[in-house]
Image: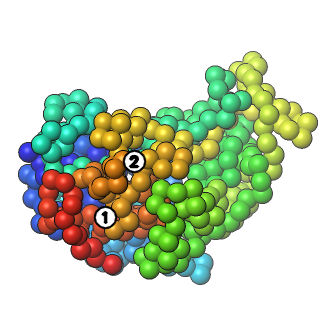
Amino acid sequence: MSRWVVVGAGIHGTYVARALREAGVSADELTVLDRRGAFLGSFREKAVACGMESLRSTYVQHLGPEPFGLETFAETRDRTDELLATADYPSRPSLSLFVDHAEDVIERFDLRQSLHGATATSFGSRDGLVVETTDGRLDTDRIVLAVGPGDRYRRPDWARGVERIEHVWDAVGPPADRVDDGDDVWVVGGGITAGQFARSVADVADSVTICSRDPLQEATIEADPRWLNWPYIESELHSLPPGSTARLERIREARYDGTIPSYIANSLRGTPNVTIRTGEIRAATSIDGRVALSLRDGSFETTDALFLATGFERAADSSVIARVADSLDLERGAAGIPVLDDGTLAWRRNDGSRSNVFVTGVLAESVIGPFAGNVPGARRAAERLVGTVHSGRRDGSTTISVRQ
């Protein structure tokens, strides 16, 4: 029997697993479920598929326990050139450096001993918690849901069923492998993913057009840095009712959604075969192996291939969240989000008591704030969860001290 079952082995699942091991949870007491059977598998695939070359977050945001651990890792391996300068902000790591450091952390904390290549299929309670998986049943004291939207990508209605239109994450492999020499390519979206993908395919395509509904909005990171501080989160967010629309509105206002860092925007503007166009597509159809587009301004265009950089569907709408909530009688708030305890991230039952199901990632944004889905959010979530390691096991009713 595992004391802890972590569902998901992405950035958040890996961070939480490492933090639990560091807090004294043994490898035998911890099970990490992931259908790929690999830590960071989905993250790596998506990073490569969208042409990511570096992280947006700074070098102090990583999966290890020491704030400057990634910097030390780079220094001891003569890789400081992969700490990339950011104007008026700390340096950020290359994707390769971030992943290699993560691998070092996974090895140092022996996390693979706890990894189980399976998918959670149902949840229940029977003298504790039960997780049914594609590889059998697990009995546990606590469940941590470290899941995001997965492979549920947002697609405009006009793009559905049209040949030669794909989402940037529909395929595995670098963007340049998905276009032919001399192609005309359109990328729909105005955020960092669109910029990364366009920059990557520009080396192969004859022309690349980024089509965004609004002019590109530049921002170094995803929200005001004050949201990285826990006292600020408590003041600005926890003063509002848990699970409320007011909290979601506060987060929406704080987050710089759909923005692109200046270093990518400037690179695109300096690439001769890249055009940045403001406009909105109304309809699309396939004609003679090309994509014909009708825009709301009345213009018509054709292209060899069109790629959607339009993000994900909402994580709260995933079937996993619905199954857990229904099976364990857990409360959902505005827009279907889990209603969580602010101190521990425990998902509240419908009677108001705390369950032993905990939530991290974007699903915990109503507690963690606009950085919930990023590495800083993983750190804040892990701090909350580690505070529960030595608390009472079954009903979650003991007093819990949490690190600030």
Disc number at residue 122?
Answer: none
For this rendering, which residue is in front, 254 or 244? 244
- Residue 272 visible to an observer of this rendering: yes
Left or right: 226 with respect to 42?
A: right
* Residue positioned 76% across, 48% down in the render: 213
| Closer to us: 268 or 226 | 226
Residue at the farthest front position: 351
The three-letter amino acid code for the residue at tag 2 is Glu
Q: Residue at x 75, y 18 (%)?
A: 288
State the image coordinates of residue 98 (x, y, percent, origin top left): 38, 63
Q: Is residue 74 left or right of residue 283?
A: left
Q: Residue 53: horizontal and vertical position, in percent?
A: 50, 58
The residue at the point 71 percent across, 62 percent down is 217
Element assignment for label 2:
loop
Q: Residue furthest right?
A: 298
Q: Nearer the viewer, residue 347 or 297?
A: 347
Above or below for 26 versus 291: below
Q: Which residue is mark 2?
A: 331
Quarter the C terminus occupies: bottom left
> Residue sitting at 68 percent across and 62 percent down?
265
> Label 1 sits on what residue type?
Thr
Question: On the image, numbered disc 1 is attached to which residue?
Answer: 344
